[in-house]
Image (spheres, helix red, strand yellow):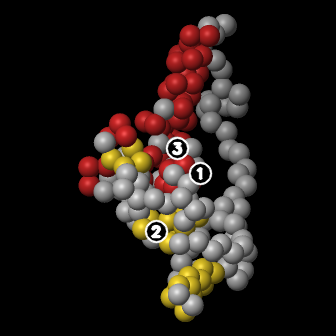
Amino acid sequence: AEVTADQLRVHVQVLASDDLAGRGVGQPGNRRAETYVEEAMRRMGAFPAVGESYLQPVSIYQPVLGPGGGLTIDGSGERIVDLRKGEDFYPLPESGAGTATARLVFAGHGISAPPQRHDDYARTDVRGAIVLLLDGAPGRLADDENLASVARKARDAFAHGAIGVIVI
């Protein structure tokens, strides 16, 4: 069977839409994307590659943090916070190693969403700063998994000029 460019465009738009809420391992959007692809395959009359199911197990590499990770925050020549990985905080596996020296700026939930008329960066200059953000999303945005994701918050922070992100 053939697939037209218009049909393919529709599939890509659905799979890339915010409605599927990201593609991180274990995110609910993944299951919705699987269901969409499975239903599309059935409608097109495609045969499953193995048995009755269109789904197949796959191995996924997921980075793991090494031992000894920590977060230290100094200000005005004195230690403010000294946190150890696993005891005091849980950095993302994608976190980098190294030292950063910059001002620390609080930017609420760190969400920039013009279509929803919400921008935590509207009156906050985070250029060259490490941004401290609240986890999740505020009230009316709380149901939008895409806006509340740490990956989205990091993208928004870096787009506004931040050099680092801490989500608490």
Q: CA distance from mark 1 to mark 3?
A: 9 Å
**Image quadrant for the C terminus?**
bottom left
Residue at horizontal 50 percent and vertical 27 percent from the top: 14
CB of mark 1 within 8 Å of CB of mark 3?
Answer: no
Mark in front: 2 vs 1: 2
Categorize mark 3 by other alpha carbons within 10 Å: few (<14), some (14-19), many (20+). Answer: many
Amino acid at circle 2: Val
The answer, for residue 39, to whether it is visible in the render is yes
Residue at horizontal 32 percent and vertical 52 percent from the top: 142
Q: Mark 2 falls on what kind of element?
A: strand
The answer, for residue 42, to whether it is visible in the render is no
Residue at horizontal 60 percent and vertical 16 percent from the top: 8
In the rendered view, would you say 77 is above or below 55?
Answer: below
Mark in front: 1 vs 3: 3
How far from the left and from the top, in percent, is residue 132?
47, 68
Q: Mark 1 falls on what kind of element?
A: loop
Residue 110 in the figure: left or right of residue 75: left
Give me the disc on residue 22. Answer: 3
Q: Residue furthest left?
A: 140
Name the residue beneath numbered marker 2.
105
Q: Nearer the viewer, residue 29 or 102?
A: 102
CB of mark 2 within 8 Å of CB of mark 3?
Answer: no
Name the residue beneath numbered marker 1.
25
